[in-house]
Image (cartoon, rainbow, N blue to C red):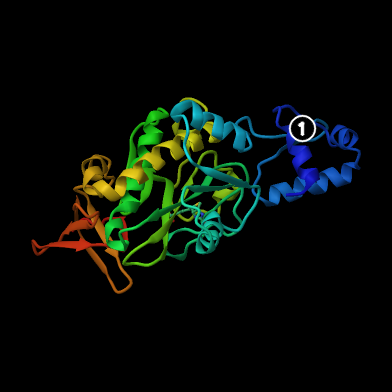
Amino acid sequence: MSDLQDKILKILQNGGFHSGESLGCQLNVSRTAIWKQLQALEALGLEIESVKGVGYRLPDSFELLSKATILKHIAESHGHLPCQLEIFQSIDSTNRYARERAETEAISGAVVLAENQTAGRGRLGKTWVSPFAANLYMSIVWNFDQGAESLQGLSLAVGVGVRRTLVKLGLQDVQLKWPNDIYIGGKKLGGILLEMIGDPNGRCTVIIGIGLNVAMPSVAAQEIDQAWTDLQTQSSSPISRNTLTAKLVVTLFLLLKDFQRVGFKAYRDEWEEADFLKNLPGTVRTVKEGISGVVLGVDDSGALRLALPNGEVQRFIGGELSLGPRL
Ligand code: BTN
């Protein structure tokens, strides 16, 4: 993001209307220069209200991520937490960046955030819609030393951590859909994408990517190909992305510290309490096939248990689960 865009946002941040002329005057540039920068910000996904003859205004909920504010909230709720925080205005993908850094540096405990992702990664090669300053896009780097097997169920446990945080913030009926989607009211609120590097039998590093819709602008939402929701719609009080980030970091750091010792088993009951599809008809699509049955829940390793029409119970460690059909 350019210096001029940054300055424009700082002025618009007070929530009032500002004309192109007054912005130009304050920043010593032409109205056209202001207009061009506003267009560029809109192209990043920022929703700017424009009223002819009055000026431009940002959405009521607008708040930029602030390293100082996030660290202050973390310190208030937890004292010292060894967390290196990096915030990008725009980046292709926080997971891509975190992963590349982790390949050459020891950065366990690093947290990477971005206001906008130009190539946000979702599961199964999908794109994660990431408009500017609207939602939460975060990657956490964490080292584990007992190999990939000890990480079974980690992504589900992270889902439990995200849910705990949202419940603390007053959100109701937060559900989890296997393996690691966050839902409210049958609509997707967020997702988790884990990437692993290192030795699958020994020391490895996991990049934990979390995307949560906070205040999804309607234009960006047109790119989403499934039922979605955001925290602003679901919460009775305004959600600050800085507070949300700090609470998530504290909850997830504690969870990640414990995970290798206790494993997914310790989170299983909580996960099943929030299971969106439990006892409902479901279909698991793997690379090879689609298998339908009734969703029973998960086992101690986080594998999905599906009751097949022939009475057998099949376990899945990967695949995409969807609702239906009723058999
Ligand atoms: C999903 O498909 O449900 C997982 C989405 C994960 C998105 C997050 S946003 C922050 C991090 N960086 C990425 O590129 N992806 C993850």
Q: Is residue 196 above or below residue 5?
A: below
At a point 44% along the width and 33% down the height, the residue shown is 234
* Disc 1 target residue: 11
- Look at the image and tell me whether residue 82 can be seen: yes
- 266 displayed left or right of 258: left
- The answer to whether 278 appears left or right of 90 in the picture is left
Q: Who is closer to the viewer here, 24 or 88?
A: 88
On screen, residue 226 versus residue 284, left or right, reads right
* Residue at 40 percent of width and 45 percent of height: 187
Give the position of the C terminus as an image quadrant. bottom left
- Number of other residues with Cα within 10 Å of mark 1, as a class: few under 14, some 14 to 19, many 20 or more: some
Q: In which quarter of the view is residue 235 placed?
A: top left
Q: From the top left corner, tell me how far across and down residue 265 is, in percent.
A: 21, 48
Residue 163 image offset from top left, x and y in percent: 36, 39
Residue 184 at least partly seen: no
Q: Residue furthest left?
A: 311
